Amino acid sequence: VNFVDHGGPGIVAFPNGPFLHVKDLSKTLKTMQSKKMFKQLVFYMEACESGSMFPDLQADGKILAVTASNGQESSWGTYCGDAAMVKGKNIGSCLGDLFSVNWMEDDDLGKLASETFRSQISKVTKLTNQSHVCSFGDKSFENEAIGDVEVEGAALSETPSTDSSVDARDIYVSQAFWAWQNAPEELKSQAWTRFVSIINDRERDDQLFAKIGGKACADSQEPAECQKQMLDKRSELKDMACHYTLASAVHEHCPVSASHHATGGWNGYNMKFSQVLLNLCEGQELLGKDLEQLSKIVQEECIQAKGLTEMVV
């Protein structure tokens, strides 16, 4: 299985629907195990904080997951900007993601019959030098040949330069700035408008989650310090039900960023703030608030932000 999209702590996105939560992915994999729907499963995931998506894999569960990043960092796009060339034409986007490009280009060397998963993971871990590749679960079949589950590739590609790599959180804004820099004079104004629109959306997301953290901390003895903790702390996800409820509230009630091609309140930039919701859930005792109160705060702030966004538009 190869999954590529945006992500955040405990969540990954889909291009045309709601997010997938770690609790649902874990439940699905356990169901597939119990129904013996596979002999062995190798799961490659390319997403920011993708290392947070496989907390329950067992050492003998016949599932090996390999992620582009750990649970606290972004993954990276590559072949971006001037390097995004296809048949002599720049397409104004990133052609791939660093982790995925590295393992696919390794496949393209055509050695699948002899190369093992262990060997490829080792190579890709070294090549993916902007984030920390992680592996989880059952590693008992890492020494099996990749060719047992993949068809041989036919192309030989060069290794991507880190100079063409971009933090996945910044791909849209980087693309927009590149497009403005390279636009013909008659299209400069239009390109600049799009760039500014993306910047504004990002700033609104920053302000929204700061307000959520601030409101949750309103009854704290030191509100400012509490808010800082909620925004910056890296708590471990334990209360999945709470996190799922708050993450769903964001998807359903927060403004939809057209500039990020979002289908709900989450987008490729603000999914990093899933950590804020995680911190709220794990800090309920400190905050003196239960799930119902936290959910109400998230919904109210999202609805207010949506109203302000609609007024601006």
Image (cartoon, rainbow, N blue to C red):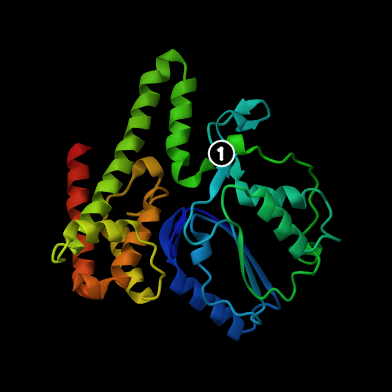
- Seen in the picture, residue 292 relative to 195 is either above or below; the reply is below
Q: Which residue is more in the foreground, 215 or 293?
A: 215
Q: The N terminus appears in which quarter of the rendering?
A: bottom right
Q: Which residue is more in the foreground, 238 or 268?
A: 238
Residue 79 visible in image: no
- Seen in the picture, residue 27 relative to 72 is either above or below; the reply is below
Left or right for 257, reference 75: left
Based on the displayed image, in which of its 4 quarters is residue 143 positioned?
bottom right
Q: Residues within 10 Å of mark 1 (few under 14, many from 20)?
A: many
Based on the displayed image, in which of its 4 quarters is residue 238 positioned?
bottom left
- Seen in the picture, residue 176 relative to 152 is either above or below; the reply is above
Where does residue 192 sit, x and y in percent of width and height?
37, 25
Left or right for 150, reference 22: right
Where does residue 142 sit, x and y in percent of width and height?
74, 69
> What residue is at 29 percent from the left and 42 percent from the top?
203
Secondary structure, mark 1, is loop
Left or right for 280, reference 87: left
Q: Which residue is more in the foreground, 281 or 301?
A: 281
Residue 144 visible in image: yes
> What residue is at 81 percent from the left and 55 percent from the top?
152
Where does residue 301 sit, x and y in percent of width and height?
19, 56
> What residue is at 68 percent from the left and 48 percent from the top?
127
Where does residue 237 sit, x and y in percent of width and height?
41, 71
> What residue is at 55 percent from the left and 31 percent from the top?
81
Query: Which residue position is annotated with label 1?
Result: 94
Q: Amino acid at mark 1?
A: Cys
